[in-house]
Image: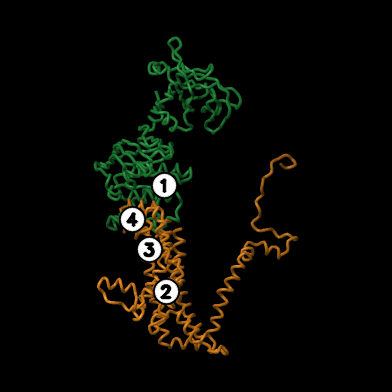
Amino acid sequence: MAPDGSARAIATPAPLRPARSPGVSSLERLARRRSTIAFVMTVPLILVIAGLVAWPAAYAMYLSTLNRRMTASVGFDNYMFMIESETFWMVAWQSCFFAITAVLLKALIGFWLAHMLHNLPVRGQRKWRGMLLVPWVIPPALSTLGWWWMFDPSYSSINWIINVFGFPDVPWLGHPWWARIAVIMVNVWYGAPFFMIMYLAALKSVPEQLYEAAAIDGATSSQKLFYVTLPMMQNIISITVLFSLIVTFANYDIVRVLTNGGPRDTTHLFATYAAQVGILSGHLPRGAAVSLFMLPVLAVAAFFILRGVTRRTREMM
Amino acid sequence: MSEVNLRKVVKLFEGGVQAVRGIDLEIADHEFCVLVGPSGCGKSTTLRMIAGLEEVSEGEIWIGGTMVNDIPPKDRDIAMVFQNYALYPHMTVFENMAFGLKLRHFPKDEIKRRVDRAASILSIGELLDRKPKALSGGQRQRVAMGRAIVRDPKVFLFDEPLSNLDAKLRVQMRTEIKKVHQAVKTTTIYVTHDQVEAMTLADRVVVMNHGVIEQVGPPNELYHHPATIFVAGFIGSPAMNFIPARLVNAAGALTIQLGQGLSVPVPADRTARYAPHASKKLLFGIRPEHLTETTRTDKQNLAPITVDLDVIEPMGMETLVHFRIEGTPVCARVDPAAGAQAGAPMRLAAHMDQMHLIDADTGRVL
């Protein structure tokens, strides 16, 4: 109550911008601005990113312009050397082939597994989900060792099974194409559960009523998949594919353990080749140049995929 | 020929929950039938069984002379409007409406003709290129209805289609739905928990409770002649008053004793009907609009009672007054000019022609 007995408004609406009063310094005003507060609160994250991402990236760029002993700048010579090298182009081709094939297979198998899980009764679902996630939880270097043993020319258990069905032995890690298939197989085995779990979450978020509406509209199960499920999952599919593409393209451990790039460098990826050139052969600047070739490829893919995601989000959500 | 028949339909959910307990219902061609009841009464489950979205546990459902128990939804020739509209968010309004026709391989120009016609009935012609996200709730509801209309089905099914709209839009869309039904005349089954929607839209109202049908009839019949205490209390707002009462036979005239010194006479034409129930536990039922100020003289059979008012609720065109009879809260509707005042006594008149007597044990209206 006001002194005169009349009721007073409980809160007076605050002005949108604080009025300029002589008592408030411009520094204080700056500190009070929402954008300033937001910036200050993100400073720790900016520092982490600067320290762990920006600085190493910038240093790699600088490194790639030096000579072998890292004493003088050679400009773009390291890049030019790579572009003229036949092995480098083979590595580039193998990286693209490996990443695209593996991501495609992971996406398909993950989608299929997610659908199977989604249609299981709820009680059985958790058990199967847990079991199917196992490949993704084991450290890949360790599980790849297991695969290496299964591919071993002398005691390969996979060959033993193939023999049971009357087929001859397969030189898994000794022949370029079989070795390429082997690294893709292991990568798919390791990565498909990630797709499965992402797709399962996406499937669960599609409202049941859309399927009911589609059923009444006359859709068969495959039409429901193409006209309802896939369009509704498009964003999750895009983001998962982009993420997996980056991780698969930059894969190191599986190839390192399984084939070490062989036979005859045919299974090398950018990362393993960069390590071989930079560390094993002792030419660090050239290794840095190899790894930096990944950047434009992934940046272009990321640009197009994220543009699609943003557009769909604006239209649908 | 698009009548819908339900014969001894039962729905048993996993875990033994019986949502629908053997209902029989015949819905005529072109009829607008509204299933109404509180949540959990089985009305939506019944609708979903008719749509084919839920299996029928027992009994038969017939649409247009065909038993549809084992026919999938797409082959039942029905269209449904959902509570949350269920529009496909990645399709434009046109694509949403055309989807069912496209799946049924209609020629393109026929699809366009039908969508344009439905769009003009619902006045959404200018929205056809938009995605559902860019529409308001009312517009989405229209699109959902358009999707049903273009199919030209045997039966329209509406599952609480107005629940997500604000009060003003709900009234507006209610009129739209009625207009659409008058234009296309398709047999319609409409589920709602709102008795006002049921009363205003329906040719016939089906009141459900605990998985059974309490009463079926035209809105006015349900209002004036409810069969059970549930229907009497559910239809009408504010709800009917139920006051514990005793029948007293004094010198050949039957009176209803409502409490100490408060009694009203039974109308002469009902004496014979009520007399055999004199020994039973009874409830006197009267709607607030039939308890009015005494100044109205155009009505016969007014029984005066005097009460002490507790609360007054002025509504503008009328005033609701609340009081108690022997501890039972009672509401009456009086003229704002009648001068009702909280805490003051008021003389009211019970319109005895509109009263109901209910057997408290069976819940049946006598």
Q: Would residue B334 be visible to someone looking at this image? A: no
Is tag 2's residue or tag 3's residue first in the polypeptide sequence?
3
Residues flagged by tags 1 and 3 on a common chain: no
Q: Nearer the viewer, residue A88 or B185?
A: A88
| Residue A312 in the image, given as x and y percentages of width and height | 44, 62
Q: Quadrant of the C terminus of chain B?
A: top left
Residue of label 2: A145
Q: Please tell me which residue is depicted at 37% across the width and 72% down the height of the picture.
A: A185
Which chain is assigned green? B
A22 left or right of B115 in image? right
Secondary structure under badge 3?
Answer: helix
The amino acid at mark 3 is: Phe
10 Å neighbourhood of mark 3: few (<14), some, or many (≥20)? many
Residue of label 3: A111
In front: label 2 or label 4:
2
10 Å neighbourhood of mark 4: few (<14), some, or many (≥20)? many
Residues flagged by tags 4 and 3 on a common chain: no
10 Å neighbourhood of mark 2: few (<14), some, or many (≥20)? some
In front: label 2 or label 3:
2
User: What color is chain A drawn in?
Assistant: orange
Q: CA distance from mark 2 to mark 4?
A: 52 Å
Q: CA distance from mark 2 to mark 3?
A: 27 Å
| Residue A81 in the image, given as x and y percentages of width and height | 46, 88
Secondary structure under badge 2?
Answer: helix
Residue of label 4: B99
Secondary structure under badge 4?
Answer: helix
Q: Nearer the viewer, residue B295 or B250?
A: B250
